[in-house]
Amino acid sequence: MSEATPTAQALPEDDEISLLDLLQVVAENLRLLILGPLAAGLLALGITFAITPTFTASTKFMPPQQQQSGAAAMLSSLGALGGLAGAATGLKNPADQYVAFMKSRSVQDAMVERFKLMERYESKFREDARKTLETSSVIASGKDGLISVDVDDRDPQVAAQLANAYVEELGRLLSRLAVTEAQQRRLFFEKQLTNAKDKLVQSEQALKASGVNSSVLKASPAAAVEGLAKLKAGITAQEVKLASMRGYLTETAPDFKQAQTELAALRGQMARAETEEPASAAAKGADSDYISRYREFKYHETLFELFSKQYEMARVDESREGAVIQVVDAAQPPERKSKPKKATIALMTTLATGFALLLFIFMRQAWRNAAANPETAAKLAALRASMRRVKG
């Protein structure tokens, strides 16, 4: 026990000596540790004066707002046909979509062509010019709902022009796309209206081809068949409504059950109306053919009228939207450069050089201490001999 005491007391003494050795190494190289980083920082500061300054222009705008239009009240007449048209309008964060639009290849190519960026960036390929433009641009949406566009360039005028051009090219892209609720409904009903018109023309031609005679006119198809055609059109609209509701409702939902009940009621009315159709009209070949074609004609005519109303309402809502992009702050040519940040570069260079020199003197001192130890010196000599043999 008495012999272990000196050993235990020697450990703190060794630690203290090691710490003093480190402080001694720092003190011996204090001039290098001070003058070296200062020289490197001054050199970096001097180099920054030779770097071409970069200017950053910024613009902020409010993206198109997804609002409920006045035509929503009329969508109930078509059930889910209207819901289908606006199903894709609900986005969790619409601003992210417009950011993606401005980062798209279509907008970037338009910018490259408009400002001749391949020549300005000295790019051999269009892809390289797009990458340089993307690197020089920062497009992001903030928590305030605004989208900011920051563009770097050597010329402050060009930087401002590029930032504003992003917004302009986004507007041109949106004019070709159906993004807002009114635009989507207009596009949807435009397609449905075209199909309904083609089928209406076909049914009208088929009706004319059947011929009209006095016995058929006595059957009064306008009174007996027009109701069936409207019922059939209502059943079609209700079936589409159920199909679309399955995308966002379960079959146990009250609205879904109510829609099923309404469809069953319409089908029941259709069945009763068909059984009440005059038997004489069904028995006569030519008359029955005319009545069935007349029923088909009235069916497509009803659908055409419904789609026409919805299409016109969508067009009115779309025209009310006007300029969907509202610029809050247009980009102006910056008066001060944004890069290079001379003070930051000089300070970071000074700190990095000081750390590197401190590490260097510690490693050099460790190497000297190892060389002073005979055992370690022998190992280093053997290592050098091995390296020479490998090189030889």
Image (cartoon, rainbow, N blue to C red):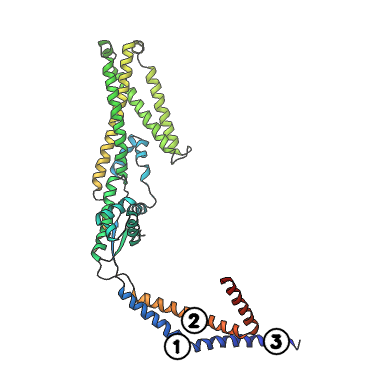
State the SS at label 2: helix
254 over 223 or under it: above or below? below
Residue nearest the viewer, comparing 275 with 324: 324
Tell me how far mark 2 sits from mark 3, CA to CA.
Answer: 32 Å
Q: Identify residue for label 3.
A: 7
Q: Is residue 324 visible?
A: no
Residue at the front extreme of this rendering: 392
Tell me how far mark 3 sits from mark 1, CA to CA.
Answer: 38 Å
Foreground mark, 2 or 3, reads 2
Residue at horizontal 42%, vertical 38%?
Answer: 245
Q: Quadrant of residue 218?
A: top left
State the SS at label 1: helix
Position in image of residue 3 (x %, y %)? 75, 88
**Which mark is drawn over residue 358?**
2
Residue nearest the viewer, comparing 62 with 153: 153
**Disc 2 residue type (three-letter):** Leu
Foreground mark, 3 or 1, reads 1
**Disc 3 residue type (three-letter):** Thr
Residue at horizontal 36%, vertical 53%?
Answer: 100
Residue at horizontal 31%, vertical 17%?
Answer: 291
State the SS at label 3: helix
Residue at horizontal 33%, vertical 34%?
Answer: 77
Q: Identify residue for label 1.
A: 31
Q: Earlier in the sequence, mark 3 or mark 1?
A: 3
Query: Counting other residues with Cα less than 10 Å from the Cα at mark 2, is it few (<14), some (14-19), or many (20 or more)?
Result: some
Q: Are marks 2 and 3 in contact (CB under 8 Å)?
A: no
**Disc 1 residue type (three-letter):** Arg
Quadrant in the picture for the C terminus: bottom right
Position in image of residue 309 (x %, y %)? 27, 35
Residue at the right extreme of this rendering: 1
Q: Earlier in the sequence, mark 2 or mark 1?
A: 1
